[in-house]
Image: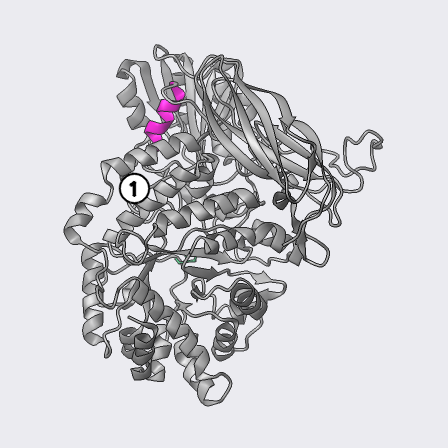
Amino acid sequence: MTTSTIQNLMKQMTLDEKIAQLLQLAGPFFKGSSEQGHITGPMAAMPISDEHIKNAGSVLGVSGAAEVISIQSTHLENNRLGIPLLFMADIVHGYKTIFPVPLAIACSWDPELAQKSAEIAAKEAAVSGVHVTFAPMVDLVRDPRWGRVMESTGEDSYLNQVFAKAFVRGFQGPDLANDPQSVAACVKHFAAYGAAEAGRDYNTVDLSERQLREFYLPAYKAALNEGCEMVMTAFNTVDGIPATGNEKLMRSLLRDEWGFDGILISDWGAVKELIPHGVAEDDKEAALKAIKAGVDIEMMTACYVQHLAELVSEGEIEEAIIDEAVLRILTLKDKLRLFEKPNRGVDVELEQQVVGHQDHLQVSKELATKSCVLLKNDHHILPLNKNKNIALIGPFVDSGDILGPWSALGLKEEAVTLKQAFEKHLPIEQLNIVTGCHVETISSQQLEEAVHAASSADVIIVAVGEDSEMSGEAGCRTNIQLPAPQLELLKALATCGKPIITILFNGRPLDLHGVLEYSDAILEAWYPGSEGGSAIVDLLYGIAIPSGKLTMSFPVNVGQVPVYYNHFNTGRPKGAPDAQERYVSQYLDAPNDPMFPFGFGLSYTQFSYSDLELTSTQLTTDTEITATVNVSNVGSFTGEEIVQFYIQDLVGEVVRPMKELKSFQSITLEPGDTKQVTFTITEQQLRYHHADFSFKSDKGSFILYAGTNSIDVLSHSFQLISQGRN
Ligand code: BGC
């Protein structure tokens, strides 16, 4: 269709029909839908009539080829002008084949594989009828109390941008319009949802414009630059005004400054939530504020369909503002060719073949292997020798609850558990499997059995963690240690005098007190997805070598939160040569540094860094510096290393972070081998928002760091001798 055909269609639409296009309803509202759909928010009674449903523009949380075809065809029969529905769903880290949670995916530092996972998710979802996924979630996170950190790619703005782009490329493919195996992406949650005060979901966000622009906004922008079709609002306030009613954020910044002309959708119920936020008196005012702010689709509340027409007739808003929103929605429907093929991509037979395909599971396993992070490995206890007798203990040994929140159609019963993977790998006589405790309870009998099993084994493997309900949306915790019964189990096992290898299944960085002291090795497996068990067994036995690195710091304890690598120095930094003992920025009862920093992760082999050299120590706007560093494998396994480059601007007009990740490179080295890794420094990489928000660099001294994580680095200084700006 051309724009004028869409406009002609709009001319035939009544005002009520147009307004109904702005309504998004969950599956259960539609005839032909299964009872439930995927409900991800409160299902308040909604004042919705059959007429609204007939004319609604989109549906969420429904998938499955037969069901989608049935809803779409009923809809087309009932809709006067034959306008098809858009089907949207949360396909976050897989549809049926479940990949590790995004925080884990990020720990692979492998954007190509991340892209591949999104491609597969899109393929499976599209054949099952999904047109738009509510992903990627690119919120920057610094507070592990917040349950949704598992859905983010971590604390670093640069890395978040890299993954935002990779996910959008994966979901949308190179030709969204013509490729029915792709889905449109919807970046969320705009903006700064990850900065909820005290890590409590839906809580206030209060950031300076500088923090927003420097750290939080770039990943949303990166997704849009990659062609992401939609944006979802955040539940929180931004500078005192809820994002969903925030004209400055949505109109001035998103639309005017960034030039975004795609669809802006509210989060679930967020339009009506302007009332409890305290910026709208009632549904009518909520509708007024949201439409004025530029929200096109209202998800799961009825303020628009109830009040927009009235607001037009009262002259509070122009009909043009509604037309603008409808045009965007119809344009996406048209772009996806839904007017010609309302059943775009969806195919009952193909669905059987594509969804959960063996090749997809293979990629999931590969990604899970690369996502696990080895946090500790004393005395090279790992990898294990196949002759050892193993006591396999813990609530996650025989649990399929390793897919994590937002796992769409993934079934726990189908996930490869640790037990299944071990039973494939070892003769049964070498394995003694006991539960030890449940996630949140323990009995003395369980404890006895566990100690008994452990006593007769060579090695104890303990699988502990948080169940998936303990993170994800509304899954916040103030205590980020393992639940007490699991700590009790570990403590008891430690009395057996056998080496303990702990596997962690969780969605957030944890306070590892009670784990670190009793474990000889710790493998952070996160929620590893459909093939979790097999990936972990490969790692434990050295069939694969750990290479994952953290993208979010693990605090020493919750009192340190937020603790992140790219903080400022303060005026009284701890550890400065002339620092006093007391009057410095520090805690009396804990270090400033986290337990495990950003970028940290061990391998079975060891890497050594040397000879960080620069082709010049003077940089201008027209020149580049090539930095090289030698990385050697000085251990005895072939391994992959993620080489990280950071820069520090020593003197800025505005205070600059201690380090900022600027580049990384993954290399594989055989034992004894050395590779020279190169990084090109340009003046553009040194630009930031100055006092007046102009984006430019500072002349002066900088330090380049190269290393294996954000703390263990080599350094080299250089000078910028001419200033550049955008
Ligand atoms: C979540 C969104 C999600 C939406 C639809 C909301 O509760 O915040 O991330 O996309 O539900 O399921």
Taking the image as shown, residue 521 lies to the left or right of residue 14, namely right
Residue 41 forms part of the magenta stretch = no
Query: Residue at left 28%, top 22%?
Result: 423
Magenta segment, prevailing SS (helix, strand or loop): helix
**Counting other residues with Cα less than 10 Å from the Cα at mark 1, is it few (<14), some (14-19), or many (20 or more)?**
many
Q: Which residue is denoted by mark 1 in the rendering?
A: 97
* Quadrant assignment, res 446: top left
* Quadrant assignment, res 387: top left
Q: Where are the magenta residues, as a range? A: 531-541
Residue lying farthest to the top in this orientation? 387
Taking the image as shown, residue 298 lies to the left or right of residue 354, namely right
Residue 416 in the image: state x and y as whole percent.
30, 32
Q: Is residue 692 above or below residue 121?
A: below
Q: Is residue 219 above or below residue 589?
A: below
Q: Nearer the viewer, residue 677 or 197?
A: 677
Residue lying farthest to the left in this orientation? 349
Residue lying farthest to the bottom in this orientation? 314
Is residue 455 visible in the rendered image? The answer is: yes
Residue 698 in the image: state x and y as whole percent.
72, 46
For label 1, being within 8 Å of ligand 1 is answered no
Residue 431 in the image: state x and y as whole percent.
32, 17
Question: Callout 1, which amino acid?
Answer: Thr
Quarter containing the N terminus: bottom left
